Image (cartoon, grey):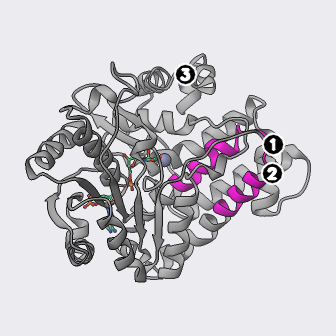
Amino acid sequence: MNSFAIYTPTRIFFGPDQRASFAESAARLGKHAFVVTGGGSVERLGYLKHVTDALTAAGVTISYFSGVEPNPEAATINRAAAQLKAAGADFVVAVGGGSVMDAAKGIAALAYTGEEDIWPFVIGESRAFQLGGAIPIAAVPTTTATASEVTPFAVISNRAARGKSILIAEFLKPQAAWLNPEYTTGLSPVTTQDGAADILSHIFESYLLGGNESPLADRYSEGVIHTVIETLPRVLENPADTAARGDLFWASTLALNDYQKAGRSESQFVLHAIEHALSAHQPSLAHGRGLATLYPAYLRWLLVNGRAQDRIAQLGERIFGLTGTEQERAGGFIARFEDWLAANGLLQSLEELGFHESDYASIANYAVTTYGDGRELDALGSLPASEIVA
Ligand code: NZQ
Ligand code: ZN
């Protein structure tokens, strides 16, 4: 196993009965919460009031900001931060999906630094990695997807500039998070599918090109994959199954809390770079949907180029119980995985998502130039664009 350092400051509360404990923990972060929500789902479903009642009971004053869009815009974050300052709030509580949690991170950073525009601080812009801190953040995730409740990332879009990029800083990791599976029973089948695809991608990104040196990270990762493969069909069949929803929820957190890559030689966000380029091109595209569309071509591309055959074969053996030569098990994994994607509403082409071959060059260029420090992406950048995203 290789050396590593991990920082996991998030106090996690899991389960419906953890509401008061979460609220008490959040109340230790400040006196006045700036509660951030999305386009109205958590209000409509009653989750927001359920959370804020507990915060109020714990002695917290509350100001509200709603209207964070999926793939959150920098301008929305800037506007929210100005409202936070006017209200005098001293910590942020996100109640929503990855988009809301990521927006909350941007808002918390602007509140701490006094800056007015978050965009210059994303990767690829003039002040990347120069944010000095963030006021405390608590999160109540309501999708089973991004793990933003434990990550140092905030994915931010700017249609007026060039699309989608990332803030990365350890101080953006939330300090408290409440995962209540009951809050995820209202997710649509499509958002549930998209989220499952995102969970798997977070595992793939370190598993496929991460080397063989961390057998425990492999077993851990395979456990997450197994859980998603088994649980998504159950959840789609019975959306109110809170036990299955909970399994998916916990899998989402475990897939990107850094334990999935501990001891590996490297971890490269190839699929994410290409997906962010897709979303930059088509802002209404859900992150997980874009990833799922890339899986089959990416896995085949790896095999064709003699990359990660042993890793894909190991997945074939351990996830689907396949036998045979390494080549057979690797090819078999891709075929079985594609069947699973199809059976769970996650297999589609880029054309079906509305992309055209004429878009591919600019998509590939965006992926490579935005995240061009990734070695794998540099390799991708030397290929004809059609081979990367087709
Ligand atoms: O806007 P509202 O009304 O809240 O509706 C949302 C939205 O339409 C809805 N929703 C959320 N919770 C719900 C619900 N509907 C019913 N019941 C609930 N309980 O779901 C829709 C999608 O929400 P969104 O937050 O956009 O989805 P997701 O959680 O998949 O987040 C996607 C964003 O996270 C970024 C993605 O790039 C994308 O911008 N990511 C963030 C990461 C991170 N911070 O570490 C890592 C990820 O890889 C990812 O890139
Ligand atoms: Zn993701």
In the image, which disc is placed on residue 215? 2
Q: Was residue 206 drawn as part of the magenta stretch in this picture? A: yes
| Quarter containing the N terminus | top right
The answer, for residue 369, to whether it is visible in the render is: yes
Element on which disc 2 rests: helix
Which amino acid type is marked by label 1? Asn
**Pointer 3 with pointer 1, Cβ within 8 A:** no
Q: Residue at x 47, y 49 (%)?
A: 151
Q: Residue at x 67, y 34 (%)?
A: 301
Element on which disc 3 rests: loop
Left or right, 62 with reference to 345: left
Q: Is residue 76 above or below residue 323?
A: above
Can you identify the residue that label 1 sits on? 212
Which amino acid type is marked by label 3? Asp
Measure the C-alpha gap from mark 3 to mark 1: 23 Å
Q: Which of 362 and 133 lies nearest the eye of the viewer?
A: 133
Measure the C-alpha gap from mark 2 to mark 3: 27 Å
Tell me the magenta residue range. 198-225
The image shows residue 216 at horizontal and vertical percentages of 77, 55
Q: Find ligand 1 in the image and state its quadrant.
A: bottom left
The image shows residue 288 at horizontal and vertical percentages of 46, 51
**Pointer 1 with pointer 2, Cβ within 8 A:** yes
Q: Residue at x 32, y 72 (%)?
A: 23
The image shows residue 49 at horizontal and vertical percentages of 21, 75
In the image, which disc is placed on residue 373? 3
Check the image and name the residue furthest to the right.
Answer: 325
Which amino acid type is marked by label 2? Pro
Element on which disc 1 rests: loop
